[in-house]
Each structure stands twice: as structure tokens, then as C-alpha cells.
């Protein structure tokens, strides 16, 4: 504890009596010692300031008129001293003019006592000063505790922030390839979490020669728990361990064929409902694409309708919606089939794109997305997804995106 820092509670207050009259100092000192105060004395302001430098008093009782610095001048100098705790200042004066009182208050005095000093009044003023000092020191102690707690919380936040940055890197690494050229078609991926990590993910996996699986996932909620569920779901659609991929069926050593996308979603729903103890659910669009003939089988589970942009620039939306995965046991899922011709492209995206709102609350929606795709029809590959995000920022007028945004773009060459 610093020399000028006092404990709270019932302790003996230190009082500095400053008066050029030795008799006045003796009289006040005898009262104060009788009442349990620790008393120091000074004959003038200069001596008092030196004592305050060595030991900061709890209370100062100072005469107004003294040689050298006056009581108000001493009070100003006292207030300018560096200290931890507050010092209560009482001026002794025979002055009663309003201007004199205003001058004393302006100098920083807390209270006044009129000479000759009445013992009963002095004790009452000191009791009032003690109450103020106790409240101030209790508040100081609480503020110190708050600051200590905030420092601890800041340290925890910094540690958590560092972990989240690493988690973001790991989540981004799930997109092992943001661009892949299949010859007849090219695939581009983009992931933009609203925070450090999010519940969105897009990806692909090989099915067999000339066929690939594509998916877009959006787990409910935001943050770490959603990201963990996303990573778990992605493991069920693994591109590196086909034996663990629920969308594949092994038909021979090292040979696999694709399950119907609707069947895969039903299997995912069963696992989430029976094996994972979580309140999260997720939407997903899962496609089985023939890169040679262009045929596509697509199943939706609450995910936004994928968009097809034909070679002539027109945009259409496909799919039947459906329930999210993880809401209802034994849920059934529908699938649709369609074909992509040379020059066509398929966009699978999360609702963070179409539900992006302008400052006025207007969502981009499917019509807005179709308009943006028309504006960007000449742009291909990753540049298209990057330009789409710039257009989205223009719509939001650079507001922070409220939801994760992910997108997958499959383009058949002309």
C-alpha cells in the first residue's frame, strides 16, 4: 500500500492542523486526540505542504489567515498534489461574507468552521468528513477490484482471440482448394465468416471418374460451436477418406459409387439426431454432377435454392427447399435433376448472401442475386465470387455483414 493510500473501514484518521497560533493548534489537537484521531501540526502552509509530502493526511483543518500562503492558497496547492485517496479540507475562518465563502469553495475546500471553534460543531463536521472519506475509499477499492477484474478479462479475451484466429485459419484450411480445373468444368469456392469463425462451409469430393459431389452447409448460429458442428458434418463428406463419406457406397476395392443425394441427407439427419448431442441444426444443398454429360442430381435441406446461369445470361433457381437436417427424426428429403450445358454455371450459396440487408432493411433476395449475376456474366472463376462479394458490400453500403457468406461456383466451359 502506498504511503498516501488509506484502508477502508474503521481506522484512525490522520488530521493535520495548520494554524500560526500555537494555542489554537493545542486546543484543536487536544479535542482531536481525545476523539481518537492521529494529529500532526504545522505553523504555516509551507510547513504543512512539507508534511503532506511525507505523509498525506486524511483531513486538513487550516486557518484562513496565515503568514505566507493563505488558507485558500494552501488549499489550492494541496489539491494539486499527487495522491491516491481524497483529502478532506476544512477552513477555519471568521469570514462570513458570501464572496469569501465562494472563494474558499473555489479553492477546493470541503467545509468551513467559524472561529471560535465549537467542539460539538467540530466533531459533527469531522463525522461528515469521515463519511465522505469512507465512501470515497470504498469506491476506490471497488474500482480497483473492477480494474483488476477487467485486466483479467482482457487477458482471457486476448487468449481467446488468439485461439479464434488460429481456429479461423483451420476452418479456412477446410477449403483445401479454392479453385480446381476439371477440364470440362472449373470449380471455385469462397468462404467469408461474419466473425472469426462461422457455421458455413462449401466443398467438393470425387465420386468416380467424371463425377464429383458438391455441397454447401450452413449450421445454425454463429461462432465456435457452429464451426465445430460444421467441421464434424464436413467429415461425413470427406474428400480424402472415401470410406467415411456418407455420400459414397463402396462397390469394390478402392471403387465407389454415389448414393442418391436425398438418401445421403436422410443418413446425415439420422446421425445428427441420434449420435450428436447438440441443439444445432443445419441446412445443406448436395449435388452429384456428371462432368461429362452435364447431368446433375440435387437435394436440398432448407438451404437457399441454387442458381443456374445459362450461357445466354438468364438465371433460374432450382430445388424444392425442404426441412433442415437435425430438426425432425426420420425426415424425408426430395431431390431434383437437371442438366448443365456448355457455358452454363451453377451457384450454391448460403442465405448470408440473399438475406444481406441494405441500411434501409431491404434484403438482396433471389431477384437481387439474379441481377448481380447478370451484371457479372462476363467474369469467370474466383474473380466472379470476389466481384460478387464487392457487389454485396455495395448493397450493404459497407455495413458489417450480419451472417456468414459462402458460395460454390461450378462453370462448364463453352
Image (cartoon, helix red, strand yellow):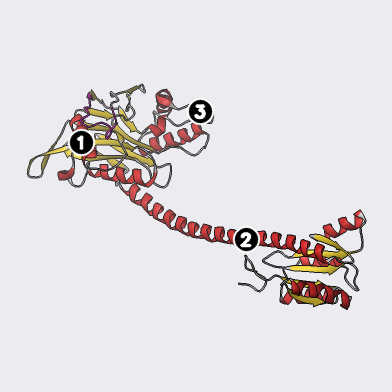
Seen as rendered, the residue at the extreme left is: 252
Q: Are marks 3 and 2 in contact (CB under 8 Å)?
A: no
Does residue 269 appear to the left or right of 377 in the view shown? left
Tag 1's secondary structure? helix
Which of pointers 3 and 2 indicates the residue nearer the eye? 2
Give the mark nearer the N terminus: 3 vs 2: 2
Q: Quadrant of residue 406?
A: top left
**In whole angstroms, how far apart are the C-alphas of marks 3 and 2?**
48 Å
Give the residue pinned by disc 1.
270
**In whole angstroms, how far apart are the C-alphas of marks 1 and 3?**
37 Å
Give the residue pinned by disc 3.
361
Indicate whether residue 326 is drawn in magenta. Answer: yes
Which of pointers 1 and 2 indicates the residue nearer the eye? 2
Give the residue pinned by disc 2.
138
Which of pointers 1 and 3 indicates the residue nearer the eye? 1
Does residue 297 appear to the left or right of 157 in the view shown? left
> Can residue 108 be seen in this snapshot?
no
Which range is magenta?
323-336
Whole-percent x, y for residue 105 in the image: 83, 57
Tag 2's secondary structure? helix
Does residue 370 appear to the left or right of 144 in the view shown? left
Residue at image location 20% in from the left, 47% down from the top:
240
Amino acid at each position: 500500500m502506498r504511503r498516501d493510500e488509506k484502508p477502508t473501514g474503521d481506522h484512525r484518521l490522520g488530521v493535520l492542523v495548520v494554524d500560526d497560533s500555537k494555542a489554537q493548534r493545542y486546543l484543536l489537537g487536544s479535542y482531536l486526540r481525545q476523539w481518537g484521531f492521529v494529529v500532526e501540526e504545522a505553523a504555516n502552509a509551507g510547513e504543512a505542504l512539507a508534511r503532506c509530502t511525507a505523509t498525506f493526511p486524511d483531513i486538513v483543518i487550516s486557518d484562513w489567515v496565515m503568514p505566507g500562503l493563505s488558507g485558500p492558497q494552501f488549499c489550492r496547492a494541496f489539491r494539486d498534489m499527487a495522491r491516491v485517496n481524497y483529502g478532506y479540507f476544512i477552513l477555519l475562518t471568521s469570514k462570513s461574507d458570501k464572496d469569501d465563502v465562494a472563494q474558499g469553495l473555489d479553492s477546493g475546500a470541503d467545509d468551513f468552521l467559524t472561529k471560535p471553534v465549537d467542539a460539538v460543531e467540530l466533531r459533527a463536521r469531522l463525522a461528515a468528513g469521515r463519511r465522505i472519506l469512507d465512501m470515497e475509499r470504498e469506491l476506490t477499492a471497488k474500482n480497483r477490484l473492477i480494474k483488476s477484474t477487467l485486466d483479467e478479462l482482457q487477458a482471457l479475451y486476448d487468449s481467446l482471440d488468439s485461439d479464434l484466429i488460429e481456429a479461423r485459419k483451420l476452418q479456412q484450411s477446410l477449403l483445401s482448394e479454392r479453385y480446381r480445373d476439371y477440364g470440362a468444368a472449373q470449380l471455385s469456392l469462397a468462404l467469408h465468416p461474419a466473425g472469426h469463425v462461422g457455421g458455413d462451409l462449401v466443398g467438393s469430393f470425387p465420386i468416380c471418374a467424371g463425377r464429383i459431389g458438391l455441397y454447401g452447409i450452413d449450421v445454425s448460429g454463429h461462432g465456435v460451436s457452429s464451426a465445430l458442428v460444421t467441421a464434424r458434418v464436413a467429415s461425413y463428406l470427406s474428400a480424402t477418406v472415401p470410406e467415411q463419406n456418407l455420400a459414397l457406397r463402396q462397390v469394390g476395392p478402392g471403387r465407389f459409387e454415389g448414393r442418391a443425394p436425398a438418401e445421403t441427407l436422410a443418413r446425415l439427419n439420422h446421425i445428427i439426431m441420434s449420435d450428436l448431442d447438440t441443439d444445432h441444426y443445419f441446412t445443406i444443398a448436395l449435388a452429384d454432377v456428371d462432368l461429362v454429360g452435364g447431368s446433375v442430381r440435387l437435394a436440398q435441406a432448407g438451404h437457399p435454392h441454387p442458381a443456374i446461369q445459362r450461357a445466354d445470361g438468364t438465371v433460374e433457381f432450382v430445388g424444392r427447399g425442404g426441412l433442415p437436417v437435425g430438426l425432425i427424426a426420420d425426415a424425408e428429403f426430395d431431390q431434383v435433376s437437371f442438366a448443365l450445358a456448355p457455358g452454363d454455371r451453377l451457384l450454391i450459396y448460403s442465405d448470408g448472401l440473399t438475406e444481406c440487408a441494405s441500411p434501409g432493411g431491404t434484403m438482396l433476395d433471389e431477384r437481387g442475386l439474379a441481377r448481380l449475376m447478370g451484371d457479372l456474366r462476363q467474369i469467370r472463376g474466383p474473380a466472379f465470387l470476389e466481384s460478387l462479394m464487392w457487389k454485396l458490400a455495395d448493397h450493404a453500403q459497407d455495413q458489417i455483414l450480419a451472417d456468414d457468406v459462402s458460395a460454390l461456383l461450378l462453370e462448364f466451359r463453352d
